[in-house]
Image (tube, coloured by chain):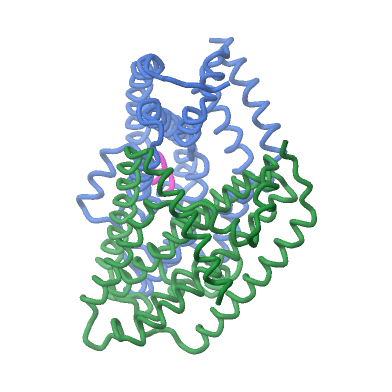
Amino acid sequence: MGELRRTARIFWVHARVSLLAELQYRTDAWARLISTIALLASSLAAVLIVYSHVDSINGWTSSDLIVVLGSFFLVGAITNGIVHLSMAELAKDIKQGTLDFRLLKPVDAQVLALVQKVDPWRMLDVLVGIGLVAWGMAHAGPDSALGTLGAVGGALAMLLAATIVIAGFWLLITCIAFWTVQGEGILWALDDMFEHLRWPITIFGPALRVALMTVFPAGLAITVPAQALTGRLGAGMTLVTILVAATFAIAARLAWRAALRRYEGASG
Amino acid sequence: MTRTWRGFAGALRANLLVRMQYRANLAIWAFTGVLQVVVYMSVWRAVADASGGSASGFTAAEFAGYFCAFLVVREATYSFIAWHMSSYVQDGSIATMLARPQHPVLVLVSEMTSYRMLSMLLIVPIAGVLFVAFDATVHTTPLAVVAALALLPLGAGVRMLTDSLLGLTSVKFIRISGILAAYYAIVTFFSGQFAPLAALPDWMQQIARALPFWWVTGLPAELLIGRADPSEALTGAAVLGAWLVVSWVALQVAWPRAMRIAETVGG
């Protein structure tokens, strides 16, 4: 518990520093606002176009899809607002040898690496995500499980599991930079792939579904909170999510330790 | 002119050598493009199945054929020049590029061309595998395929010039991630990347025909699967030719003005 509080404090300190840094570039807020609006508009347009042809896809109605979009924005805020930026910073540190300074600090270096950079403008995505989930709940049919207290609790638990999956996977990939030195390109590619996962993986064929749960587990991370909110999350999928989250957490820890043993540093 | 081409050929050779050293990076980016297309393909196949076998005249197999063709066309005409130019302006390296005898846009075009030459070696076989794996169908003719292939260089030229124009806005705004996000959202919907033109509402189809992006990728993809008549390639060539001239003139006008206000600090 003490370790958790300490981690939260480290995150809060970094979030505050990031906010102060970002406030120096206030005109950038417009660019971020346009980004979020473009993402929201294109996501809603995609749902409207698809549902002009059908009433539901594999049982997912348009209201349910709006909930998936809400989950996409919430998971996206964590992925792009904290994990991606922090991993890009880590890749840069590895390349320039400045990771030495972070390793010397009296906190867990892995935790520090994962939360070292926060994009405060991504709070906009959190608000959009909550708004979309609320809209989806308000427009769901009377038989839907949307909005029940259990569903919300389950969704929060799945969001936590999704965060662990995302953090573990992104760190695992970034650890490759300890061997290849070049790591930023891969991270941008992951970011690009994430942007197109605005659909529940259960509408895909088995091969793609499995790939988006394991090879690139962002699909699982976006889908399970939405499944919990819409009453579609069975015991099997819950178990799979917990197993995937545990696997990535352990694999990331082992990869981090192996990578640090290899790291030679080069700062001057 | 000969000097310009010699410079371009030299830059292309150098970029090819650099890219060949980062083969894993290239494969990852190619995989990114494949995933995007496979996601949209899977969505529309599910829509066709849910609508009783077909949607907007496409069966699930025909949607698969369209997206396999689109994957190849997209890769042949893809451009990340806007991103690269904005990053060169942000980190100041545009200053070094300006000091060299080659035009920076020419260097960016050589970067893009070298990427495309290598990524196509991966994408074409992948599209073939997806074609088989998703049980795709096409009803094309050799003439339609030739017409589609003939449009690709024109389309690639238009995309690179429009991207260059967009990248130039970074001279004024420095960070253009918001502008680029809006641009890529427009490209996704109006290029045929999200869905074939027939699956879009009428008003979106009209906008798509008024913009260059559907002519760059959507039309060649529809020619490759036999949805568009080969005669439409002539209209396509005329439209793309017009866009090429307009964007070229716009770049000639915008470039010197942009460089006058550029305040780069690179070393």
Q: Is residue B219 magenta?
A: yes
Q: Is residue A43 visible?
A: yes
Q: Nearer the viewer, residue B138 or A264?
A: A264
Q: Find residue B234 and report its horizontal and vertical position in percent.
A: 36, 34
Q: Which residues are magenta?
A: B216-221
Q: Nearer the viewer, residue B134 or A68?
A: A68
**The colour assigned to chain B within the rendered structure:** blue
Residue found at x 46% / y 59%: A12
Q: Find residue A120 and report its horizontal and vertical position in percent.
A: 39, 52
**The colour assigned to chain A within the rendered structure:** green
Left or right placement of residue B96 versus residue B152 in this view:
right
Q: Find residue B79 and report its horizontal and vertical position in percent.
A: 48, 37
Q: Find residue A132 and report its horizontal and vertical position in percent.
A: 28, 67
Q: Judge whether B1 appears above or below B166 on screen.
A: above
Q: Quadrant of residue B166?
A: top left
Q: Judge whether A226 appears above or below B221 on screen.
A: below
